[in-house]
Image (spheres, helix red, strand yellow):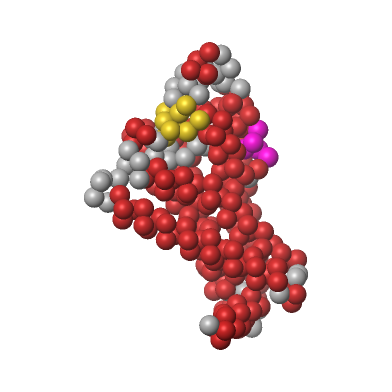
């Protein structure tokens, strides 16, 4: 890093553009979404960890998912809520805090490769001081740099994005192909109905993640669609964490039964 980097150790976060009339409406909606995500995911973690009958590998996998959702949402929403109530010229963040936030944002997605990408970006000096996003991520940090020799960053970023999306789509296609084959050959209507119900909701969550994730990644290269990119990036971090407890939690028979018993027990005490 050179002197230009240290001159811009305080960054301005562009955030989302909301009119003064809609500020409190947007703030209230995002706050309610954040509360729902935290309560539903924490409740799922507590339920799985306290019920001995749910101490199975599959349920521990379900327990890992809400923990990841809690982390990914908490990294984004509290600061976003704070920035919404501030003037656009007062949304400051230090460069170090921005790098830390970007690190945890990408931990939410896929740890090791994104950490390497951030490492490649941090090594660059930066001459700009504006984060063109509601939060810090690798692409926003990369845009701070004015260096020309960034071929490694561009090649790695493009290759990794292509490999990530290709592998994700291929694995889902193969998995659902096998499920569809079982459903076609099976004559068990109850099993087929359960499979269709579970897979359809899972596929809906996956498509939301895929569309919003690919949108905000690719639109980083098109400043004209900055607001659409910001909306997609926020949806990527709030919609799946809000739906996952319903899709993977309440649709699992054992968890649903335990949750109903727990809820009835709590209401009975009150």
Q: Residue most toward the bottom?
A: 268
When asked about the image quadrant of residue 177, the answer is: bottom right
The N terminus: image quadrant: top right
Q: Where in the figure is residue 204, as x and y percent of width and height? A: 49, 62
- Left or right: 190, with 76 as reference point: right
Q: Residue most toward the left?
A: 21
Q: Where in the figure is residue 35, as x and y percent of width and height? A: 48, 61
Q: Who is closer to the viewer here, 179 or 46?
A: 46
Q: Where in the figure is residue 70, as x and y percent of width and height? A: 57, 55
- Left or right: 253, with 39 as reference point: right
Q: Residue most toward the front?
A: 270
Majority secondary structure of magenta residues: helix
When asked about the image quadrant of residue 197, the answer is: bottom right
**Residue 48 can be seen in this image:** yes
Q: Who is closer to the viewer here, 247 or 134?
A: 134
When asked about the image quadrant of residue 122, the answer is: top right
Identified at 50% across, 46% down, the residue is 76
Q: Note whether 43 is above or below 17 in the view shown.
A: below
Residue 147 part of the magenta-drawn span: no
Number of numbered discs present?
A: 0
Residue bounds of the magenta highlight: 112-116
Q: Note whether 4 is above or below 56 in the view shown.
A: above
**Residue 202 can be seen in this image:** no
Residue 114 part of the magenta-drawn span: yes
Q: Where in the figure is residue 224, as x and y percent of width and height? A: 33, 34
Q: Note whether 133 is above or below 240 in the view shown.
A: above
Q: Who is closer to the viewer here, 10 or 153?
A: 10
Identified at 39% across, 39% down, the residue is 15
Identified at 27% across, 51% down, the residue is 22
């Amino acid at each position: 890093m050179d002197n230009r980097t240290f001159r811009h150790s305080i960054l301005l976060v562009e955030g989302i553009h909301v009119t003064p009339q809609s500020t409190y409406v947007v703030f209230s909606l995002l706050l309610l979404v954040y509360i729902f995500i935290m309560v539903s995911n924490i409740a799922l973690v507590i339920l799985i960890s306290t019920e001995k009958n749910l101490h199975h590998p599959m349920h521990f996998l379900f327990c890992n998912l809400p923990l990841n959702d809690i982390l990914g949402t908490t990294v984004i929403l509290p600061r976003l809520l704070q920035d919404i109530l501030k003037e656009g010229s007062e949304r400051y963040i230090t460069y170090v805090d921005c790098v830390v936030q970007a690190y945890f944002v990408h931990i939410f997605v896929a740890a090791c490769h994104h950490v390497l990408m951030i490492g490649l970006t941090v090594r660059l000096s930066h001459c700009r001081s504006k984060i063109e996003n509601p939060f810090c991520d690798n692409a926003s940090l990369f845009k701070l740099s004015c260096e020309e020799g960034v071929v490694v960053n561009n090649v790695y970023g493009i290759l990794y994005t292509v490999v990530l999306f290709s592998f994700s789509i291929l694995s889902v296609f193969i998995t659902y192909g096998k499920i569809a084959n079982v459903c076609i050959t099976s004559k068990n209507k109850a099993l087929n109905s359960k499979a269709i119900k579970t897979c359809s909701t899972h596929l809906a969550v996956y498509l939301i993640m895929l569309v919003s994730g690919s949108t905000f990644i690719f639109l980083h290269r098109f400043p004209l669609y900055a607001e659409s990119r910001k909306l997609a990036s926020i949806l990527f971090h709030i919609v799946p964490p809000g739906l996952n407890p319903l899709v993977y939690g309440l649709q699992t028979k054992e968890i649903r039964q335990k949750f109903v018993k727990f809820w009835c027990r709590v209401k009975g005490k009150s």
